[in-house]
Amino acid sequence: MQQCDLAGIKPSNRALLVSIERQTLQLYNGGSLAKSYVISTSKRPPSNIKNSLGTPRGLHAIAEKIGAGQPPGIVFKSRVATGYHFHEHLERGGRDENLITSRILWLKGLEPGVNQGGEVDTYSRYVYIHGTNREDLLGQPQSAGCVVMGNLDVIELFEQVRVGDPVLIVD
């Protein structure tokens, strides 16, 4: 079994468990399951390697929370709210792609050489938990490596978690 440096983990009552196989994200609070959400992970096989577009496995933490107070469905580009709802984005000539919407929970890996540093750094790969304009595809792989959720679900989760909360992503 691989050893992991747990020095980056701060004590927390909250933890997230992402199952790639089940396409679920579970929020634990005080050691008990508080809520389970249907999600989508990468269309590609799980991978921690840069440019793989696979959802990275292993122990992570929430590094940044972005989008507080924005309306549901707002589109983000480079982590900045565009001011447009995803319906407006498409009407303005935007591509019909899996957009980053509503909220962003930016993840950082906590396992050096596995999901932290060099060619396997989750944070520098810009891997997020975020909302999507393709809620109709939740429950099946659809992303380019991120964990995507329904817009109201990611807003609800955003309000429950804090920077530093652990996120374990498993097959």
Image (cartoon, rainbow, N blue to C red):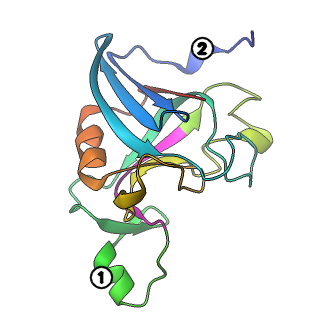
The image quadrant of residue 122 is top right
Return the residue nearer the eye: 105 or 169.
169
Q: Is residue 139 above or below residue 51?
A: above
Q: Which sits earlier in the primary sequence, circle 1 or circle 2?
A: 2
Residue 83 makes an appearance in the image? no
Q: What is the magenta segment's predominant secondary structure? A: strand
The verdict on residue 151 being magenta is no
The percent position of residue 44, horizontal first and vertical second, equals 67, 51
The percent position of residue 115, horizontal first and vertical second, equals 68, 33
* Residue at position x 48%, y 33% in the image: 22
For the magenta stretch, what is the residue range? 98-107
- Inspect the image, locate mark 1, and give the three-letter code of the amino acid beneath it: Glu
Is 168 on the left-hand or right-hand side of 52? left
Under tag 2, what secondary structure?
helix
* Residue at position x 66%, y 47% in the image: 54
- Of badges 1 and 2, the one in the foreground is 1
To which residue does mark 1 refer?
88
The percent position of residue 112, horizontal first and vertical second, equals 72, 26
Q: In this view, does 156 lie above or below 110?
A: below
Location of the N terminus (image quadrant): top right
Residue 18 makes an appearance in the image? yes
To which residue does mark 2 refer?
6
Under tag 1, what secondary structure?
helix
